[in-house]
Image (cartoon, rainbow, N blue to C red):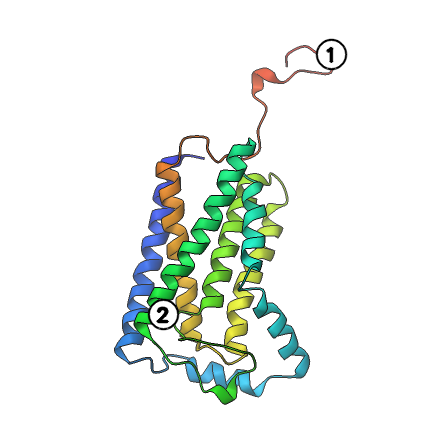
Amino acid sequence: MNRKHTAEAAGSLGLGAWAAFGVLTMVVAGRNGAPLFLDHGLLSWSVGHRPPTAVAAARGLTATGTGVIPYVLVLPAGLLVGATRAQRLAAALLGAACLAAGQAVRYGVMELVARVRPPEPDWRTHASNWSYPSGHTTTAALTAGLVILAIWIRAPRGRTAFCLAVACWGAGVGLTRIYLGVHWSTDVLGGWLFASGWLGLCLCAAAWWLPSGCVTGPPRARADDRTDTAGEPV
């Protein structure tokens, strides 16, 4: 993987996501947290489509987007990366640090914007603090991004299906926040944009400043090391 190209791609992704997040945040703050775009419509649809089984499933899924579960996913994913024990440990700790720092910055933005949640009678799960950007959404998206990155680096085959499954989980947690009535749709969109920007920033920094070879994919045999069945070089 070319470090310069990786840093440029991650930086471009991060800047684009940050720009979109900044615009959305200014609009939300400028309207004093009033609902935007499809906020009312999506909340109304959710309130009208809540069979008990779907609500129970949504509660179960939304619970995986907070607490220790994201770290339980990120740390083992980091241990998959790297060719040595030290590299794997470093990758796991860097992933956890990226997640924790992103959560802290997100919390600061939430306190600054101070957006009120949807009406409490529409809630179907517990919620606290302000609404924008959604904490569960941000945490799940950050976790999904880090796990996908680890899978993409390490898994030589079948990684597309695993990555899609993880992406669906991350997106699903965000959607449950709307369905359960504790967030406006723009809170969830803001969480996705924030997570994309933060991941882009962290990946760009890692590509530029980590020592070469600190995080690598699975070792590949060199052409001059391969031999045929008779023991002669190929």
Give the amino acid type for the residue marked by disc 1 in the picture: Ala
Q: To which residue does mark 2 refer? A: 110
Classify the position of the N terminus by image quarter. Answer: top left
Q: Residue at x 53, y 40 (%)?
A: 153
Please provide percent x and percent y for residue 114. Answer: 33, 75
Q: Residue at x 38, y 81 (%)?
A: 116
| Sequence order check, earlier mark of 1 and 2 | 2
Q: Residue at x 60, y 41 (%)?
A: 155
Helix, strand or loop under label 2? helix
Give the amino acid type for the residue marked by disc 2 in the picture: Met
Residue density around tag 1, few if under 14, some if 14–19, many if 20 or more, within 10 Å = few
Of 36 and 177, which appears nearest the observer? 177
Please provide percent x and percent y for residue 189. Answer: 42, 69
Of 104 and 57, which appears nearest the observer? 104
- Name the disc covering residue 186, or none: none
- Name the disc covering residue 230, or none: 1
Judged left or right of residue 44, residue 212 is: left
Helix, strand or loop under label 1? loop
Please provide percent x and percent y for residue 178. Answer: 50, 76
- Above or below, 116 relative to 23: below
